[in-house]
Amino acid sequence: MLNILFMGTPDFAKDSLEAVFNAGHNIIGVVTNPDKPKGRGMKMIFSAVKEFALEHNISVYQPLDLKNNAQFIEKIKSLSPDVICVVAYGKILPKEILDIPQYGCINVHASLLPKYRGAAPIQWAVLNGENVTGVTTMYMDEGMDTGDIILTKKVFIGEDETTGELWNRLSKLGGELLTGTIDKLENGEASRIPQGNDYTMAPMLSKEMAKINWKEKRTKEIKNLVRGLDPIMGAYTMYQDKKIKLWKVEIIENYEIEQEKYLPGQILIANDKEGLYIKTIDGIIKVIEIQGENAKRMNVCDFLRGNKLEVGSVLE
C-alpha cells in the first residue's frame, strides 16, 4: 500500500480526499491553505479539506508558503510519501517537493488537458459554451498543468448547466479518477502521455468581466456568461444606477418583432405574469432568476411584483 500525502483546499479537493480515504488508501497527512477570517465577525474558517481531515484524525499541515520553506520541505521528506496527490491546492509546488515522492506528484485537473490549463478550467468551459469537458490526472512538473497525462474521463456539458452544477459533477468524477490513478501507480500500470503544444489557458476570472455588454455580446454569449458566473459572482447589468444580477436566462426563439426598432439591452416585457424579456444584438433573452441590489436571488416574477422595470428602458 502506498503512503499518500494529500494537498488540497476547497470542496472540489475534499471530494477527492474522501474518495481516496474511502478506498482504503493510507493517507499519511494533508496539506491545505491556512485558515481565513470570514464574515462580519471575521471568524476563522477551515478549508473543506482540513475539516474532513480533522474528522478522520488525519494530520494537517498549513504552511503559509512553500517557496524557500526549508523547514516544511524537511517535514515532507520525514513523512516519506510514496506519492503526493494534489487537487486544487492553490499554491505552486517547487521542484524540491516535486522530487520527493518515489512515484511523483499527481494532480487532478478539471479539464481535458491540454485544453484549459490554469486556475479556472470549469468556469471557462461554461463561459465559452463548450459541450464537452472532463477530468485529467497527470504527473506534475514545474510547468502550469503541463505534465504527462495518466487518465482522462470525458463528460458532456448540459445546455443550461451552470459552473456550480458542473463543478459538483467533476468534483465527484475527480475523486473516482484519482483512486483509479493510485491503483494504476501501485500496480505499475500508470501510463505517461505527453501533452504536446496544442493547448489553451483558463486564467483566473476578473470582476470586470461580470458586467453584461449588451452592445457587443450575442444572445448565446450572454447566456453563457450568466451560467458561467453562477454561483461565483453572477453576471450583472445596471438599471437606473442600480446593479441587477441575472442568474438564469433562456433564449427565446421565434419571437416576432421588428428588430431594428429596438436597442440591445432594451426591456421588451416586464410584468409579473409574463416575466422579463430583453433585446440583444441578435435576439431576445427571457430572465428566469434575478437579484436586485441588496436583495436575495429569486424568481423573476416574484421580483417584478415588488420592483418596477420600465418597458422601453435600456439596461447598461
Image (spheres, grey):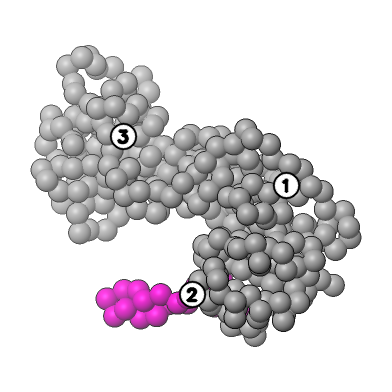
The disc placed on residue 213 is none
Distance from label 2 to label 1 (Cα)?
29 Å
Residue 226 location in percent, x, y? 37, 42
Q: Residues within 10 Å of mark 1 (few under 14, many from 20)?
A: many
The disc placed on residue 149 is 1
| Segment colored magenta | 32-53
- The three-letter code of the residue at mark 3 reads Lys
Q: Residue at x 72, y 80 (%)?
A: 79
Furthest toward the bottom, the residue is 57
Q: Earlier in the sequence, mark 3 or mark 2?
A: 2
> What kind of element bears circle 2?
loop
Is label 2 or label 1 in front? 2
Picture quarter with the N terminus: bottom right
Q: Is residue 187 magenta?
A: no
The residue that disc 3 covers is 286
Residue 240 quadrant: top left
Distance from label 1 to label 3 (Cα)?
42 Å
Picture quarter with the C terminus: top left
The residue that disc 2 covers is 64
